[in-house]
Image (cartoon, grey):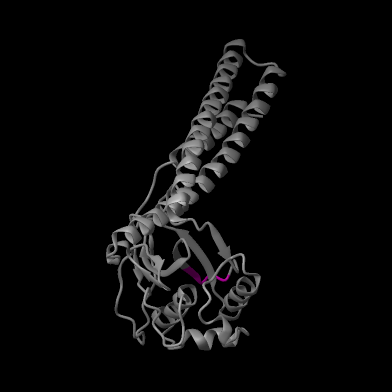
Amino acid sequence: MDYKNKYLIYKQKYLSLKKQLVGGTRFLSIPNGGGGEPGIANQCIWISIRDYLNYHRGMVTTVIGLKRQIGLGPETDTIEYDDYNQVLRNALERLAVSLRITLCFIYTRHDGTIAPYCLNQDGTMKPFRIINRGTGNNVYIATFGRHFELIVDGPNYQLERHRNSTIREVNPYQPKVRVKNNYVVPTQVSDYEERQIVQASINLVETNQNIDYFENQLKDIRKVINDNQEGLRNIKSIDLDIEEKAMLISSYEQMIKDGNYTIDTIRSKLELLRQEQATLELIIN
């Protein structure tokens, strides 16, 4: 076995994880904050799919038509989508299957860029959640909190517009928050106290996303450390050239030390983020 090559693989994994601490890129989406149809409210996830069918397939349909197709009645037409609502979640999965589409959800930040943990090393988008994998028809949907918009132009990605599409408004994405049963950008809120609450809500979404991200980073880096510890044990137990063996042992030990330092750094960040989370929740509530 080439132990030197194995060490280099472990090192690359660790460096790749460290690079993922930064990121963010802008993109274009189809804004749908106003609802877009009479008789519905807070239906942006379904609107995003309706917009995909219009923009990419040239199909003109309605949110109500799509929802009735999968068994959702009028009582759901003003209920905001929530992953914890099993009825809505199952219905969304049925719709993806029936339309032969793969739903790819991308977290965004309060400045309108893609969150770093939703970007691969090559700059392509990396969904944090995928529904109905493997169709070949990826539908990228930006999400901020519980607001959703269809991505039509992003990093290394462009959704082709169908010649029969009636959609013309495509803009740089702006995150939105729910205020008085509607989704708005923060600058549209005139009342000072309400604007403070809205801004705190935006910051809380990003804080929660960062907590999730760093918790996943901890798991990944712990795995890399475990791999390096296994490699170190293997190196110590085999016969190699003395100088080469000493070099590999030193390299593994340094990688393990660096990994533990990174874990301590992430733990400190998580502690600060959780303090920020508690403060923001007090402002909102």
Question: Vertical placement of 69 versus 157: above or below?
Answer: below
Where does the image place residue 103, in percent across and percent down from the top left? 53, 68
Which of the 4 quarters of the picture holds residue 176?
Answer: bottom left
Question: Vertical placement of 235 versus 165: above or below?
Answer: above
Where does the image place residue 36, in percent across and percent down from the top left? 39, 82
The answer to whether any part of residue 103 appears in the image is: yes
Examine the residues drawn in magenta and state their main secondary structure.
loop
Q: Which residue sits at x=72%, y=18%?
A: 237
Q: Nearer the viewer, residue 67 or 19?
A: 67
Q: Is residue 136 magenta?
A: yes
Query: How many numbered callouts?
Result: 0
**Quick check: 91 left or right of 105?**
right
**Quick check: 100 left or right of 230?**
left
Q: Is residue 209 magenta?
A: no
Which of the 4 quarters of the picture holds residue 52?
Answer: bottom left
Where does the image place residue 30, in percent across and percent down from the top left? 36, 73
Furthest residue in direction right, as rendered: 237
Q: Nearer the viewer, residue 115 or 80?
A: 80
Q: Quadrant of the N terminus?
A: top right
Question: Vertical placement of 213 versus 178: above or below?
Answer: above
The answer to whether any part of residue 155 appears in the image is: no
Q: Which residue sits at x=43%, y=73%?
A: 181
Q: Nearer the viewer, residue 161 or 25?
A: 25
Q: Which residue sits at x=68%, y=28%?
A: 230
Where does the image place residue 75, in percent across and percent down from the top left? 58, 84
Q: Nearer the viewer, residue 73 or 30?
A: 73
Q: Which residue sits at x=68%, y=17%?
A: 236
Furthest residue in direction top, as rendered: 242
**Quick check: 262 left or right of 159?**
right
Magenta region, residue range: 135-139
